Amino acid sequence: MGVTATKSGNLVVVGHGAAGLAAALTAAETARGSGRPVAVTLVEKAAPEDAGGNTRWSPSNMRMAGPDRVEPTFVQDMLAATQGRGEESYFARLAADAPATAKWLQSYGIEFIQPPYYLSKGPPRIQPVGGGANLIKALTQASIKAGVTFRYGCSAREIITKDDRIAGLVVEQAGRRETLPADAIVLACGGFQGNAPMMRTHLGDGSETMRLISPGTRFNTGDGIDMALRLGADKSGDWNGMHCEPVDARSKNSAPVVLVYPYGIVVDRNGRRFFDEGGGLMHETWEWLARNIHFKTPGSIAYSILDSRLLDITDYQRAIRSEVAPVQADTLVELAELIGVDADGLTATVATYNAACVGDPKTFDATLKDGLAAAKTLQPPKSNWARAIKMPPFIAYPLVGAVAYTFGGLATDARARVLREGFAIPGLFAAGEITGHFYATAPNAVSVLRAFVFGRIAGHEAALHLAAK
Ligand SMILES: Cc1cc2nc3c(=O)[nH]c(=O)nc-3n(C[C@H](O)[C@H](O)[C@H](O)COP(=O)(O)OP(=O)(O)OC[C@H]3O[C@@H](n4cnc5c(N)ncnc54)[C@H](O)[C@@H]3O)c2cc1C
């Protein structure tokens, strides 16, 4: 199906996740409101049954204190998460527009709940009922109603410009290339986690074999980043950064995270500990752990070792999303044999660890950093939740690191315009994972929120850009 040229022109949106759907639907709304029709086409690389990118597989928690507000400290929290390298104007716009964005989602039938965090108290967040899959469904239906044309199995390949203005988008579908007329483009096609050579270049040797956390993750191969960089776009974000989490090595599920590791120890194949498992709440240590399992441990695998007291932690199941039962045994030697870990190494490690668990186990509290630290002689230390592992059955989960998304991307301003040498490239907008802005660690529950907020801004700005032509 081709694109009909109209009075105000053609907008092509690339990507069918949160950012792309928000952009396409908002552009259609803005055009309708202004009486200047725009032909909006959304191109999506995947087939309809696979479309939706990471968003579709994501519970889509959003960092908001309620649907009508963010925490007063939101912007400062974002700057702290990015270790001061994030742009205040970007996060201030995100905070300012978040409530209107949640309201907009509600207007399309999305309801929010405030789910409990895994086990500890986490940052405030709201969650759409039905998660990302429901968001994709609801916004796709609304976009179709609003007149957006969808093309599936259609990959964006190249942006065409004429006299420095956007003129078209080269796409490839079923092996055939064509140029779609485009006066403005919104790039919303994710990070580069699904692109092995890009991963190797920016995150180092071996990163190309890191497990992808969900079936939707593989489609994000940095195409939009590459297309915009070829136009001279500026880069933003930490190109050596990614959000990754420890998952059950045996599971075939999407995102089978195992986040009870702070309450026991984590060992490598030799049975050796390699970090402070109690160094922080699990969302403060999960990226480090996933990365170090993948890059630093023999065989890129580690094992969370616990005892039966795990089962006494209220709602412990909330922190385990694997469908596979843990390995259990009555002795540590038997457990080591079952998981293929050096038995002498594991028993020696547990003996040393247990001897260092000198605090009062009654002060153990999984919901906060309980200060139950091991003796200072223990190396690596264990700063919280240091309780001896001695109550059979002993429990193990094999862990590997899995990547959700990358941080390196395009520089955009608070109007979602793609920048080149600090100035907006006329007609080119971007939102979501494809944009940089994240450094050091992923701020908890912000990726979907920013995809929606800046997706809407991009769609609105693109429609205004076309109306002003
Ligand atoms: C399991 C899981 C849990 C998560 N949990 C949370 C959470 O609770 N809160 C949170 O904030 N974040 C979470 N995230 C991260 C968050 O879901 C994503 O970062 C966010 O949804 C990205 O939205 P997006 O629109 O930018 O990209 P995506 O949703 O990934 O969409 C990008 C789309 O672009 C398409 N595409 C790629 N290349 C092309 C091309 N060349 N041409 C056409 N189409 C193309 C892809 O197929 C895809 O459909 C989670 C992620 C996963 C996988």
Image (cartoon, rainbow, N blue to C red):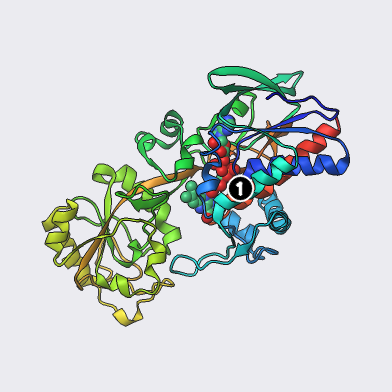
In the displayed structure, 455 sits above or below 388; it is above
Task: Please name the residue shown 22% across and 70% down the image.
Answer: 389
Task: Please name the residue shown 45% across and 65% down the image.
Answer: 118
Question: In this rendering, would 281 be left or right of 385?
Answer: right
Q: What residue is shown with label 1? A: 137
Task: Locate residue 136, reporting x and y percent.
Answer: 60, 47
Number of numbered discs visible in the structure rendering: 1
Task: Please name the residue shown 50% across and 38% down the image.
Answer: 239
Q: Tell me the quadrant of ligand 1.
A: top right
Task: Locate residue 203, reporting x and y percent.
Answer: 42, 37
- Which corner quadrant holds the N terminus? top right
Task: Locate residue 270, reporting x and y percent.
Answer: 18, 51
Task: Please name the residue shown 59% across and 65% down the image.
Answer: 113
In the displayed structure, 129 sits above or below 357; it is above
- Identify which amino acid the numbered label 1 is placed on: Lys
In the displayed structure, 349 sits above or below 190; it is below
Q: Nearer the viewer, residue 70 or 221?
A: 221
Question: In this rendering, would 334 be left or right of 66?
Answer: left
Q: Is residue 35 visible?
A: yes
